[in-house]
Amino acid sequence: MNPTPRLSTLSAVPLSALLLALLSACAIGPDYRRPDAPTSAAYKEAPAADAGWFPAAPADTLGRGDWWRLFGDAELDRLMPQVEVSNQNVAAAVAAYRQARALVGEQRAALFPSVNADASAKRSGGGASQTGTGNSLQLGVGASWAPDLWGRLGRAVESAQASAQASDADLAAARLSAQGELATDYFALRDADTELGLLRRTVDGFERALQITQNRYTAGIAPRTDVLQAQTQLAGARADLVTLAGQRAQLEHAIAVLTGQPPAAFALAQAQWTMTVPAVPLGLPSELLQRRPDIAASERAVAAANAQIGIQRAAYFPSLTLSGSFGNAGSRVGDLIGASTSLWSLGLSAAQTIFDAGATHARVEGAEAARDAAVARYRQTVLSAFQSVEDQLSATRALAEQAELRRAASEAADLAEQQQLNRYKAGQVSYTEVVTAQASALSARRTVAQLASNRQAAAIALIQALGGGWHAAPALP
Protein backbone atom coordinates (compact mmCIF):
# COMPACT_ATOMS: atom_id res chain seq x y z
CA MET A 1 0.00 0.00 0.00
CA ASN A 2 1.54 3.28 -1.12
CA PRO A 3 0.88 6.05 1.44
CA THR A 4 1.94 8.79 -1.01
CA PRO A 5 -0.52 9.42 -3.89
CA ARG A 6 0.97 9.62 -7.36
CA LEU A 7 0.21 12.54 -9.67
CA SER A 8 -1.39 10.15 -12.17
CA THR A 9 -3.89 9.16 -9.53
CA LEU A 10 -4.60 12.77 -8.51
CA SER A 11 -5.18 13.79 -12.12
CA ALA A 12 -8.54 12.06 -11.91
CA VAL A 13 -9.73 14.61 -9.34
CA PRO A 14 -10.47 17.46 -11.83
CA LEU A 15 -12.39 14.99 -13.99
CA SER A 16 -14.43 13.94 -10.96
CA ALA A 17 -15.01 17.57 -10.08
CA LEU A 18 -16.29 18.23 -13.60
CA LEU A 19 -18.62 15.26 -13.38
CA LEU A 20 -19.93 16.46 -10.04
CA ALA A 21 -20.50 19.92 -11.45
CA LEU A 22 -22.57 18.42 -14.25
CA LEU A 23 -24.59 16.40 -11.77
CA SER A 24 -25.28 19.54 -9.77
CA ALA A 25 -27.79 20.54 -12.43
CA CYS A 26 -30.11 17.87 -11.00
CA ALA A 27 -32.31 19.51 -8.35
CA ILE A 28 -34.26 17.26 -6.03
CA GLY A 29 -37.83 18.25 -5.18
CA PRO A 30 -40.87 19.57 -7.05
CA ASP A 31 -40.48 22.54 -9.39
CA TYR A 32 -42.66 25.43 -8.33
CA ARG A 33 -45.94 26.25 -10.02
CA ARG A 34 -48.19 29.04 -8.85
CA PRO A 35 -51.17 27.42 -7.12
CA ASP A 36 -54.64 27.88 -8.56
CA ALA A 37 -56.76 30.46 -6.78
CA PRO A 38 -60.51 31.03 -6.82
CA THR A 39 -61.51 34.01 -8.95
CA SER A 40 -64.42 35.27 -11.02
CA ALA A 41 -64.97 37.04 -14.31
CA ALA A 42 -66.42 40.17 -12.68
CA TYR A 43 -67.19 41.66 -9.27
CA LYS A 44 -70.66 40.88 -7.99
CA GLU A 45 -71.15 44.39 -6.56
CA ALA A 46 -69.63 46.20 -9.54
CA PRO A 47 -71.77 49.17 -10.64
CA ALA A 48 -73.80 49.03 -13.82
CA ALA A 49 -72.73 51.13 -16.76
CA ASP A 50 -75.38 53.79 -15.98
CA ALA A 51 -74.82 53.85 -12.22
CA GLY A 52 -74.56 57.40 -10.92
CA TRP A 53 -73.06 56.48 -7.56
CA PHE A 54 -69.73 55.27 -8.93
CA PRO A 55 -68.02 57.60 -11.46
CA ALA A 56 -66.51 55.83 -14.41
CA ALA A 57 -62.72 55.74 -14.67
CA PRO A 58 -60.29 54.30 -17.22
CA ALA A 59 -58.22 51.36 -16.03
CA ASP A 60 -55.01 53.38 -15.83
CA THR A 61 -56.41 56.26 -13.76
CA LEU A 62 -55.30 54.75 -10.45
CA GLY A 63 -51.65 55.71 -10.22
CA ARG A 64 -48.98 53.18 -9.45
CA GLY A 65 -47.77 55.31 -6.59
CA ASP A 66 -49.50 58.50 -5.44
CA TRP A 67 -53.05 57.16 -5.31
CA TRP A 68 -54.06 59.73 -2.66
CA ARG A 69 -53.78 62.52 -5.24
CA LEU A 70 -57.11 61.31 -6.62
CA PHE A 71 -58.73 63.17 -3.69
CA GLY A 72 -57.30 66.53 -4.76
CA ASP A 73 -56.28 67.73 -1.29
CA ALA A 74 -53.04 69.72 -1.19
CA GLU A 75 -52.50 69.26 2.55
CA LEU A 76 -52.86 65.49 2.28
CA ASP A 77 -50.43 65.54 -0.65
CA ARG A 78 -47.93 67.35 1.61
CA LEU A 79 -48.33 64.93 4.51
CA MET A 80 -48.29 61.62 2.65
CA PRO A 81 -44.59 61.52 1.60
CA GLN A 82 -43.62 61.79 5.28
CA VAL A 83 -45.09 58.33 5.88
CA GLU A 84 -42.46 56.83 3.56
CA VAL A 85 -39.62 58.64 5.31
CA SER A 86 -40.62 58.84 8.97
CA ASN A 87 -43.15 56.12 9.82
CA GLN A 88 -41.42 53.58 12.04
CA ASN A 89 -43.59 50.63 10.98
CA VAL A 90 -42.58 51.25 7.37
CA ALA A 91 -38.94 51.66 8.46
CA ALA A 92 -39.11 48.28 10.21
CA ALA A 93 -40.53 46.69 7.05
CA VAL A 94 -37.71 48.24 5.00
CA ALA A 95 -35.15 46.75 7.40
CA ALA A 96 -36.85 43.33 7.18
CA TYR A 97 -36.62 43.48 3.40
CA ARG A 98 -32.92 44.35 3.54
CA GLN A 99 -32.39 41.43 5.90
CA ALA A 100 -34.17 39.09 3.48
CA ARG A 101 -32.03 40.30 0.59
CA ALA A 102 -28.90 39.71 2.67
CA LEU A 103 -30.05 36.14 3.30
CA VAL A 104 -30.30 35.59 -0.47
CA GLY A 105 -26.64 36.64 -0.78
CA GLU A 106 -25.67 34.33 2.07
CA GLN A 107 -27.38 31.34 0.45
CA ARG A 108 -25.82 32.07 -2.94
CA ALA A 109 -22.36 32.24 -1.38
CA ALA A 110 -22.73 28.61 -0.30
CA LEU A 111 -22.68 27.58 -3.97
CA PHE A 112 -19.05 28.66 -4.34
CA PRO A 113 -15.80 27.40 -2.79
CA SER A 114 -14.51 28.96 0.39
CA VAL A 115 -10.85 29.96 0.57
CA ASN A 116 -8.91 30.69 3.73
CA ALA A 117 -5.33 31.60 4.62
CA ASP A 118 -3.49 30.83 7.83
CA ALA A 119 -0.11 31.70 9.24
CA SER A 120 1.62 30.84 12.50
CA ALA A 121 4.94 31.47 14.20
CA LYS A 122 6.26 29.71 17.31
CA ARG A 123 9.51 29.86 19.28
CA SER A 124 10.25 27.12 21.80
CA GLY A 125 13.07 26.02 24.09
CA GLY A 126 13.83 24.48 27.49
CA GLY A 127 16.34 23.69 30.24
CA ALA A 128 19.11 21.13 30.44
CA SER A 129 16.93 18.34 29.03
CA GLN A 130 16.27 20.26 25.80
CA THR A 131 18.52 20.49 22.77
CA GLY A 132 18.11 24.27 22.51
CA THR A 133 15.87 27.02 21.29
CA GLY A 134 14.16 26.88 17.87
CA ASN A 135 11.63 28.57 15.60
CA SER A 136 8.66 27.06 13.76
CA LEU A 137 6.98 29.06 10.97
CA GLN A 138 4.00 28.06 8.79
CA LEU A 139 2.14 29.81 5.94
CA GLY A 140 -0.64 28.20 3.93
CA VAL A 141 -3.77 28.61 1.81
CA GLY A 142 -6.69 26.18 1.91
CA ALA A 143 -9.94 25.80 -0.01
CA SER A 144 -13.01 23.63 0.30
CA TRP A 145 -16.12 23.18 -1.80
CA ALA A 146 -19.24 21.11 -1.31
CA PRO A 147 -20.72 20.58 -4.82
CA ASP A 148 -24.49 21.04 -4.94
CA LEU A 149 -25.04 17.51 -6.26
CA TRP A 150 -28.74 17.28 -5.58
CA GLY A 151 -29.71 20.93 -5.79
CA ARG A 152 -30.08 21.41 -2.02
CA LEU A 153 -28.20 24.71 -2.07
CA GLY A 154 -30.02 25.81 -5.21
CA ARG A 155 -33.34 25.15 -3.51
CA ALA A 156 -32.11 27.11 -0.51
CA VAL A 157 -31.40 30.06 -2.80
CA GLU A 158 -34.89 29.67 -4.33
CA SER A 159 -36.43 29.69 -0.86
CA ALA A 160 -34.44 32.75 0.19
CA GLN A 161 -35.39 34.59 -3.01
CA ALA A 162 -39.06 33.82 -2.51
CA SER A 163 -38.83 34.94 1.11
CA ALA A 164 -37.17 38.20 0.02
CA GLN A 165 -39.93 38.81 -2.52
CA ALA A 166 -42.50 38.10 0.20
CA SER A 167 -40.70 40.60 2.40
CA ASP A 168 -40.86 43.12 -0.44
CA ALA A 169 -44.61 42.58 -0.63
CA ASP A 170 -44.88 42.92 3.15
CA LEU A 171 -43.10 46.26 2.83
CA ALA A 172 -45.63 47.37 0.21
CA ALA A 173 -48.47 46.22 2.47
CA ALA A 174 -47.06 48.14 5.45
CA ARG A 175 -46.64 51.25 3.31
CA LEU A 176 -50.17 50.97 1.89
CA SER A 177 -51.64 50.40 5.36
CA ALA A 178 -49.90 53.46 6.81
CA GLN A 179 -50.92 55.59 3.83
CA GLY A 180 -54.53 54.44 4.08
CA GLU A 181 -54.62 55.10 7.81
CA LEU A 182 -53.20 58.58 7.33
CA ALA A 183 -55.75 59.44 4.63
CA THR A 184 -58.62 58.09 6.72
CA ASP A 185 -57.53 60.01 9.84
CA TYR A 186 -56.95 63.16 7.82
CA PHE A 187 -60.43 63.19 6.30
CA ALA A 188 -61.95 62.30 9.69
CA LEU A 189 -60.16 65.37 11.06
CA ARG A 190 -61.56 67.53 8.25
CA ASP A 191 -65.00 66.12 8.99
CA ALA A 192 -64.48 67.17 12.62
CA ASP A 193 -63.60 70.67 11.38
CA THR A 194 -66.87 70.77 9.43
CA GLU A 195 -68.92 69.54 12.38
CA LEU A 196 -67.21 72.02 14.70
CA GLY A 197 -68.32 74.78 12.35
CA LEU A 198 -71.87 73.40 12.40
CA LEU A 199 -71.90 73.22 16.18
CA ARG A 200 -70.57 76.76 16.57
CA ARG A 201 -73.34 78.06 14.32
CA THR A 202 -75.82 75.92 16.21
CA VAL A 203 -74.63 77.30 19.54
CA ASP A 204 -75.12 80.82 18.17
CA GLY A 205 -78.66 79.91 17.15
CA PHE A 206 -79.41 78.32 20.53
CA GLU A 207 -78.12 81.42 22.28
CA ARG A 208 -80.56 83.55 20.26
CA ALA A 209 -83.37 81.12 21.06
CA LEU A 210 -82.52 81.35 24.76
CA GLN A 211 -82.68 85.14 24.58
CA ILE A 212 -86.12 84.89 22.94
CA THR A 213 -87.46 82.61 25.68
CA GLN A 214 -85.88 84.81 28.35
CA ASN A 215 -87.61 87.89 26.90
CA ARG A 216 -90.96 86.08 26.69
CA TYR A 217 -90.59 84.84 30.24
CA THR A 218 -89.71 88.34 31.48
CA ALA A 219 -92.79 89.68 29.69
CA GLY A 220 -94.91 87.01 31.35
CA ILE A 221 -95.83 85.41 28.06
CA ALA A 222 -93.92 82.13 28.48
CA PRO A 223 -93.40 79.86 31.48
CA ARG A 224 -90.02 79.39 33.12
CA THR A 225 -89.83 75.83 31.74
CA ASP A 226 -89.25 77.33 28.28
CA VAL A 227 -86.15 79.10 29.60
CA LEU A 228 -84.93 75.92 31.26
CA GLN A 229 -85.41 73.91 28.09
CA ALA A 230 -83.51 76.50 26.06
CA GLN A 231 -80.68 76.49 28.61
CA THR A 232 -80.53 72.67 28.50
CA GLN A 233 -80.41 72.68 24.70
CA LEU A 234 -77.63 75.27 24.68
CA ALA A 235 -75.54 73.49 27.34
CA GLY A 236 -75.82 70.20 25.44
CA ALA A 237 -74.62 71.80 22.21
CA ARG A 238 -71.68 73.40 24.02
CA ALA A 239 -70.78 70.02 25.55
CA ASP A 240 -70.88 68.41 22.10
CA LEU A 241 -68.54 71.16 20.91
CA VAL A 242 -66.01 70.34 23.63
CA THR A 243 -66.27 66.59 22.97
CA LEU A 244 -65.74 67.01 19.23
CA ALA A 245 -62.74 69.30 19.82
CA GLY A 246 -61.19 66.52 21.93
CA GLN A 247 -61.79 63.97 19.18
CA ARG A 248 -60.16 66.29 16.64
CA ALA A 249 -57.11 66.62 18.88
CA GLN A 250 -56.77 62.83 19.04
CA LEU A 251 -56.93 62.58 15.25
CA GLU A 252 -54.24 65.25 15.02
CA HIS A 253 -52.07 63.23 17.42
CA ALA A 254 -52.57 60.09 15.31
CA ILE A 255 -51.53 61.93 12.14
CA ALA A 256 -48.42 63.22 13.90
CA VAL A 257 -47.35 59.69 14.85
CA LEU A 258 -48.08 58.35 11.36
CA THR A 259 -45.77 60.98 9.90
CA GLY A 260 -43.05 60.23 12.48
CA GLN A 261 -43.46 63.33 14.65
CA PRO A 262 -44.24 63.81 18.35
CA PRO A 263 -47.78 65.20 18.81
CA ALA A 264 -46.44 68.22 20.70
CA ALA A 265 -44.48 69.33 17.63
CA PHE A 266 -47.31 68.90 15.13
CA ALA A 267 -50.44 70.90 14.37
CA LEU A 268 -52.97 71.12 11.56
CA ALA A 269 -54.93 74.35 11.29
CA GLN A 270 -58.65 74.09 10.72
CA ALA A 271 -59.49 74.43 7.06
CA GLN A 272 -62.41 74.31 4.68
CA TRP A 273 -63.09 70.75 3.59
CA THR A 274 -63.96 69.99 -0.01
CA MET A 275 -65.40 66.50 -0.15
CA THR A 276 -64.23 64.60 -3.23
CA VAL A 277 -65.10 61.00 -4.02
CA PRO A 278 -62.59 59.97 -6.70
CA ALA A 279 -63.22 57.73 -9.65
CA VAL A 280 -61.63 54.38 -8.79
CA PRO A 281 -61.01 51.93 -11.67
CA LEU A 282 -62.02 48.39 -10.79
CA GLY A 283 -60.28 46.45 -13.54
CA LEU A 284 -60.67 42.67 -13.68
CA PRO A 285 -60.79 40.45 -10.59
CA SER A 286 -57.81 38.48 -11.89
CA GLU A 287 -55.70 41.65 -11.71
CA LEU A 288 -56.16 41.61 -7.95
CA LEU A 289 -53.73 38.68 -7.76
CA GLN A 290 -50.94 40.95 -9.03
CA ARG A 291 -51.94 44.24 -7.41
CA ARG A 292 -52.51 43.28 -3.78
CA PRO A 293 -49.28 42.99 -1.77
CA ASP A 294 -50.75 40.60 0.81
CA ILE A 295 -51.68 38.16 -1.97
CA ALA A 296 -48.21 38.48 -3.47
CA ALA A 297 -46.59 37.85 -0.08
CA SER A 298 -48.77 34.79 0.50
CA GLU A 299 -47.95 33.38 -2.95
CA ARG A 300 -44.22 33.89 -2.40
CA ALA A 301 -44.54 32.05 0.92
CA VAL A 302 -45.85 29.06 -1.07
CA ALA A 303 -42.79 29.23 -3.34
CA ALA A 304 -40.46 29.32 -0.33
CA ALA A 305 -42.24 26.35 1.27
CA ASN A 306 -42.06 24.42 -2.02
CA ALA A 307 -38.29 24.88 -2.17
CA GLN A 308 -37.97 23.53 1.36
CA ILE A 309 -39.27 20.15 0.14
CA GLY A 310 -36.26 19.80 -2.16
CA ILE A 311 -33.92 20.82 0.64
CA GLN A 312 -35.26 18.08 2.89
CA ARG A 313 -35.32 15.42 0.14
CA ALA A 314 -31.64 16.08 -0.60
CA ALA A 315 -30.84 14.49 2.79
CA TYR A 316 -31.59 11.10 1.22
CA PHE A 317 -28.46 11.42 -0.94
CA PRO A 318 -24.76 11.59 -0.06
CA SER A 319 -22.93 14.87 0.33
CA LEU A 320 -19.43 15.35 -1.04
CA THR A 321 -16.75 17.86 -0.11
CA LEU A 322 -13.61 18.69 -2.09
CA SER A 323 -10.70 20.22 -0.18
CA GLY A 324 -7.15 21.27 -0.92
CA SER A 325 -4.33 23.17 0.73
CA PHE A 326 -0.86 24.46 -0.11
CA GLY A 327 1.75 25.99 2.16
CA ASN A 328 5.31 26.15 3.46
CA ALA A 329 6.89 25.45 6.82
CA GLY A 330 10.34 26.11 8.22
CA SER A 331 12.41 27.62 11.01
CA ARG A 332 13.27 30.83 9.11
CA VAL A 333 11.29 33.34 7.09
CA GLY A 334 13.38 32.49 4.04
CA ASP A 335 12.23 28.89 4.25
CA LEU A 336 8.63 29.97 3.53
CA ILE A 337 9.46 30.70 -0.12
CA GLY A 338 11.54 27.61 -0.75
CA ALA A 339 10.16 24.73 -2.81
CA SER A 340 11.80 22.18 -0.56
CA THR A 341 9.65 23.25 2.39
CA SER A 342 6.29 23.26 0.57
CA LEU A 343 3.36 21.10 1.71
CA TRP A 344 0.19 20.33 -0.20
CA SER A 345 -2.89 18.14 0.06
CA LEU A 346 -5.99 17.28 -1.96
CA GLY A 347 -8.97 15.47 -0.56
CA LEU A 348 -12.43 14.17 -1.40
CA SER A 349 -14.85 13.15 1.33
CA ALA A 350 -18.35 11.75 1.19
CA ALA A 351 -21.00 11.40 3.87
CA GLN A 352 -24.26 9.48 3.78
CA THR A 353 -26.77 8.86 6.51
CA ILE A 354 -27.35 5.11 6.71
CA PHE A 355 -30.06 4.99 9.38
CA ASP A 356 -31.93 7.78 11.12
CA ALA A 357 -35.10 5.96 12.22
CA GLY A 358 -37.23 7.79 9.63
CA ALA A 359 -36.17 11.31 10.63
CA THR A 360 -35.45 12.38 7.03
CA HIS A 361 -38.77 10.98 5.85
CA ALA A 362 -40.54 12.86 8.61
CA ARG A 363 -38.82 16.11 7.67
CA VAL A 364 -39.86 15.66 4.03
CA GLU A 365 -43.44 15.00 5.06
CA GLY A 366 -43.33 18.04 7.30
CA ALA A 367 -42.07 20.22 4.46
CA GLU A 368 -44.82 18.93 2.16
CA ALA A 369 -47.44 19.63 4.82
CA ALA A 370 -46.02 23.14 5.31
CA ARG A 371 -46.29 23.72 1.54
CA ASP A 372 -49.92 22.51 1.54
CA ALA A 373 -50.70 24.81 4.46
CA ALA A 374 -49.11 27.75 2.62
CA VAL A 375 -51.25 26.97 -0.44
CA ALA A 376 -54.38 26.95 1.72
CA ARG A 377 -53.40 30.29 3.30
CA TYR A 378 -52.77 31.74 -0.16
CA ARG A 379 -56.20 30.70 -1.40
CA GLN A 380 -57.85 32.03 1.76
CA THR A 381 -56.00 35.34 1.32
CA VAL A 382 -57.35 35.57 -2.23
CA LEU A 383 -60.91 34.86 -1.05
CA SER A 384 -60.62 37.46 1.71
CA ALA A 385 -59.32 39.99 -0.81
CA PHE A 386 -62.32 39.47 -3.08
CA GLN A 387 -64.62 39.76 -0.08
CA SER A 388 -62.98 43.05 0.89
CA VAL A 389 -63.49 44.50 -2.60
CA GLU A 390 -67.12 43.39 -2.72
CA ASP A 391 -67.75 44.78 0.79
CA GLN A 392 -66.32 48.18 -0.11
CA LEU A 393 -68.26 48.31 -3.40
CA SER A 394 -71.44 47.56 -1.48
CA ALA A 395 -70.63 50.20 1.14
CA THR A 396 -69.79 52.75 -1.57
CA ARG A 397 -73.14 52.18 -3.27
CA ALA A 398 -75.11 52.37 -0.02
CA LEU A 399 -73.39 55.57 1.12
CA ALA A 400 -73.85 57.23 -2.27
CA GLU A 401 -77.56 56.38 -2.29
CA GLN A 402 -77.92 57.78 1.23
CA ALA A 403 -76.20 61.06 0.37
CA GLU A 404 -79.06 62.70 -1.53
CA LEU A 405 -81.67 61.39 0.92
CA ARG A 406 -79.73 62.69 3.93
CA ARG A 407 -79.19 66.06 2.27
CA ALA A 408 -82.92 66.38 1.55
CA ALA A 409 -83.73 65.36 5.12
CA SER A 410 -81.36 68.00 6.49
CA GLU A 411 -82.90 70.75 4.37
CA ALA A 412 -86.39 69.74 5.52
CA ALA A 413 -85.24 69.65 9.16
CA ASP A 414 -83.74 73.15 8.86
CA LEU A 415 -87.00 74.46 7.44
CA ALA A 416 -89.03 72.75 10.17
CA GLU A 417 -86.77 74.25 12.85
CA GLN A 418 -87.26 77.77 11.53
CA GLN A 419 -91.01 77.32 11.18
CA GLN A 420 -91.41 75.98 14.70
CA LEU A 421 -89.38 78.90 16.11
CA ASN A 422 -91.59 81.38 14.20
CA ARG A 423 -94.74 79.68 15.46
CA TYR A 424 -93.37 79.79 19.00
CA LYS A 425 -92.76 83.53 18.69
CA ALA A 426 -96.39 83.85 17.58
CA GLY A 427 -97.52 81.81 20.58
CA GLN A 428 -98.89 78.98 18.45
CA VAL A 429 -96.75 76.08 19.81
CA SER A 430 -94.92 75.20 23.01
CA TYR A 431 -91.19 75.48 23.27
CA THR A 432 -90.94 71.69 23.56
CA GLU A 433 -91.79 71.47 19.87
CA VAL A 434 -89.07 74.00 19.09
CA VAL A 435 -86.51 71.95 21.05
CA THR A 436 -87.50 68.81 19.18
CA ALA A 437 -87.14 70.55 15.81
CA GLN A 438 -83.77 72.00 16.81
CA ALA A 439 -82.43 68.60 17.88
CA SER A 440 -83.61 66.98 14.65
CA ALA A 441 -82.06 69.71 12.52
CA LEU A 442 -78.68 69.48 14.31
CA SER A 443 -78.63 65.70 14.01
CA ALA A 444 -79.46 65.88 10.30
CA ARG A 445 -76.69 68.42 9.63
CA ARG A 446 -74.09 66.35 11.42
CA THR A 447 -75.23 63.19 9.64
CA VAL A 448 -74.68 64.86 6.24
CA ALA A 449 -71.13 65.86 7.26
CA GLN A 450 -70.36 62.39 8.65
CA LEU A 451 -71.76 60.73 5.55
CA ALA A 452 -69.39 62.75 3.37
CA SER A 453 -66.46 61.60 5.49
CA ASN A 454 -67.70 58.00 5.36
CA ARG A 455 -67.84 58.14 1.56
CA GLN A 456 -64.22 59.21 1.40
CA ALA A 457 -63.24 56.53 3.93
CA ALA A 458 -65.01 53.93 1.79
CA ALA A 459 -63.13 55.15 -1.29
CA ILE A 460 -59.84 54.83 0.59
CA ALA A 461 -60.77 51.32 1.76
CA LEU A 462 -61.72 50.35 -1.79
CA ILE A 463 -58.38 51.59 -3.14
CA GLN A 464 -56.60 49.58 -0.43
CA ALA A 465 -58.71 46.50 -1.22
CA LEU A 466 -57.71 46.84 -4.88
CA GLY A 467 -54.03 46.95 -3.91
CA GLY A 468 -53.55 50.70 -3.96
CA GLY A 469 -50.75 51.92 -6.19
CA TRP A 470 -48.67 48.80 -5.59
CA HIS A 471 -47.88 46.34 -8.34
CA ALA A 472 -46.07 43.02 -8.36
CA ALA A 473 -42.31 43.48 -8.30
CA PRO A 474 -40.16 41.56 -10.80
CA ALA A 475 -38.38 38.49 -9.57
CA LEU A 476 -35.06 39.08 -7.86
CA PRO A 477 -32.01 38.42 -10.07
Image (cartoon, rainbow, N blue to C red):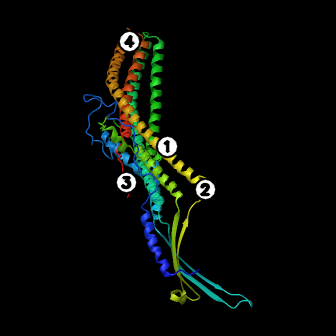
What residue would you read off at disc 2? 356
The one nearer the camera, 361 or 308, is 361
What residue would you read off at disc 4? 424
Task: Identify whether 61 is placed above or below 214.
Answer: below
Q: Are marks 4 and 2 in contact (CB under 8 Å)?
A: no
Q: Secondary structure at mark 4?
A: helix
**Residue type at the position of mark 1:** Ala
Locate residue 165, reporting x and y percent.
41, 52
Question: Badge 3 local density, few (<14 within 10 Å), some, or many (20+)?
Answer: few
Mark closer to the observer (3, 4): 3
Quarter of the image with the N terminus in it? bottom right
Locate residue 193, reporting x and y percent.
39, 34
Q: Are marks 2 and 3 in contact (CB under 8 Å)?
A: no
Q: Are marks 3 and 4 in contact (CB under 8 Å)?
A: no
Mark closer to the observer (1, 4): 1
Q: CA distance from mark 1 to mark 2?
A: 26 Å
View extreme (top): residue: 428
**Residue type at the position of mark 4:** Tyr
Locate residue 283, reporting x and y percent.
30, 38
Question: Would residue 350 be seen by someone viewing this image from the given angle?
Answer: yes
What residue would you read off at disc 3? 475
Question: Would residue 253 be seen by someone viewing this image from the given angle?
Answer: no
Question: Badge 2 local density, few (<14 within 10 Å), some, or many (20+)?
Answer: few
